[in-house]
Amino acid sequence: MLTVAKLTKRFGKNTAVDAASFSVDQPKMIGIIGASGAGKSTLLRMLNRLTDATEGDITFDGRSIIGLKGGEKRTWQSECSMIFQQFNLVPRLDVVSNVLHGTLNRRSTLATMFNLFPTEDIHAAIEILDRLGIGEHAAKRAEALSGGQQQRVAIARALMQDPKIILADEPIASLDPMNAQIVMDTLRRIHEEDGRMVIANLHTLDTARRYCDRVIGMRMGRIVFDGTPAQLTTGVARDIYGADETFSEAATSTSIEALQPQFA
């Protein structure tokens, strides 16, 4: 399905992602972990083509993605939808309109200008909101919702594109633990029920272990681990985060933020 081959991104003299390679032969839920600055977000942005790669290739179902332009690129960005940490909603618009913005890539310029949506799309958006447990908020402004609810609206917007891959860039980093669990449960359910591939940058080792079928660890732009959650041992975590010998088994079940002083 998805093959990433020696994918590299340089910003001037700095290399954000360094020859990253991995392949996924069937839909899985994959977690990408690593300290801040490891290259996780840049990797996802290259997969979605929000950022162009310096070198390397991305193929999906045998089709090269790296050189797509114009309409073909926009089609790929619908097939490989992106969810962001800060939700990227339009705060003053109602929830259902935010979800319907997931269809912009396939609508005419005129329809986009006047915010005109087909009835069947409106019904589909409400059904998705119902599925995610926030249907009763469809008519509210997005800014009136909690952070966890807004992130579920962002997930609903992604689902409106009927994507084959969902990329989630730190989807729970700004949420409290209860809402973080709801969002991760939602992504896992979408993966299992729809058979969609989900690739998520995650801030906690516990989250990767609990929700993911596969974990990729990055350090200084390189992939240094690629395996199952069971293989994510204390030693492996030390290699990923560069912690010293004080890194303990207890620390591997805490948030990355809590570990940051050890990496200074």
Image (tube, rainbow, N blue to C red):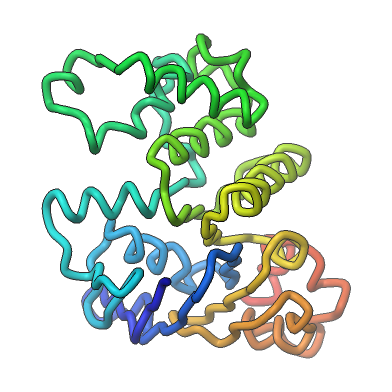
| The C terminus lies in quadrant | bottom right
Which of the pair 1/53 is nearer the observer?
Answer: 1
Residue 31 coordinates in the image, percent (x, y) = 60, 66
Name which residue lies at 43% across and 54% down.
Answer: 164
Q: Residue at x 38, y 25 (%)?
A: 100
Q: In the depicted view, which residue is nearer to us: 182 or 75?
A: 75
The image shows residue 261, relative to residue 124, as above or below, that is below
In the picture shown, does residue 186 fall above or below 258?
Answer: above
Residue located 60% across and 18% down the image: 135
Residue 28 horizontal/vertical position (percent): 58, 65
Task: Choose between 234 and 184: the one closer to the eye.
Answer: 184
Task: Please tell me whether residue 135 is drawn above or below residue 218 in the rendered image.
Answer: above
Q: Which residue is situated farthest in the top direction here?
A: 139
Q: Is residue 117 left or right of residue 90?
A: left
Residue 72 located left or right of residue 195:
left
Task: Give x and y (percent) for residue 262.
Answer: 70, 76
Q: Is residue 98 left or right of residue 173?
A: left
Q: Is residue 156 left or right of residue 211?
A: left
Instruction: Where is residue 222? Give x, y as percent.
Output: 46, 84
